[in-house]
Image (cartoon, rainbow, N blue to C red):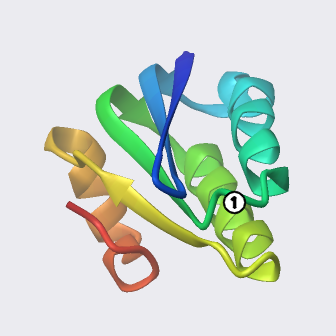
Amino acid sequence: MNTQIAHTNGKSVIRLEGRFDFSAHRAFRDAYESQLRDTQVQELEVDLGQVDYVDSSALGMLLVLKEKAAARAKAVALANCRGTVRQVLEIANFGKLFPMD
């Protein structure tokens, strides 16, 4: 999985590409931890538009991010959710936990 980070006006967008599964754990954690430490960042958006696969470990990683962000009073949203990725997120009721588009 590839990650890219973009910043605009207190918001960090973490763009993911490829398979979001356990093998992506370190790359995902490294991407969001630096953003959580940044005092200028108030919102994190995880862009899933280029993700073609998610598994239960990816769902767990998103929940960990939400918990860590909440501890720092930062919001987390999921963006560009579509296809099978969106179906998995909806089955797991992530729409109740995260703003999703």
Q: Quadrant of the C terminus?
A: bottom left
- Report the residue at 35% width, 39% height from top: 48
Residue at the left extreme of this rendering: 83
| Towards the viewer: 95 or 78 | 78
Instruction: Tell whether 87 sits left or right of 58.
Output: left
Quarter where residue 3 is shown: top right
Question: Total of numbered circles in the picture?
Answer: 1
- Report the residue at 71% width, 69% height from top: 69
| Towards the viewer: 73 or 85 | 73
Q: Quadrant of the N terminus?
A: top right
Residue 8 image position (x, y, % from top left): 44, 45
Instruction: Tell whether 7 sits left or right of 82.
Output: right
In this figure, which residue is indicated by the disc labeled 1? Answer: 65
Amino acid type shown at disc 1:
Leu
Instruction: Tell whether 31 sits left or right of 14.
Output: right
Q: Which secondary structure, mark 1?
A: helix
* Mark 1 nearby-residue class (10 Å; few <14, some 14–19, many ≥20): many
Quarter where residue 66 is shown: bottom right
- Report the residue at 44% width, 31% height from top: 15
Residue 61 image position (x, y, % from top left): 68, 51
Compared with 28, 2 (above or below) is: above
Quarter where residue 39 is shown: bottom right
Residue 96 image position (x, y, % from top left): 37, 85
| Towards the viewer: 6 or 78 | 6
- Report the residue at 80% width, 32% height from top: 30
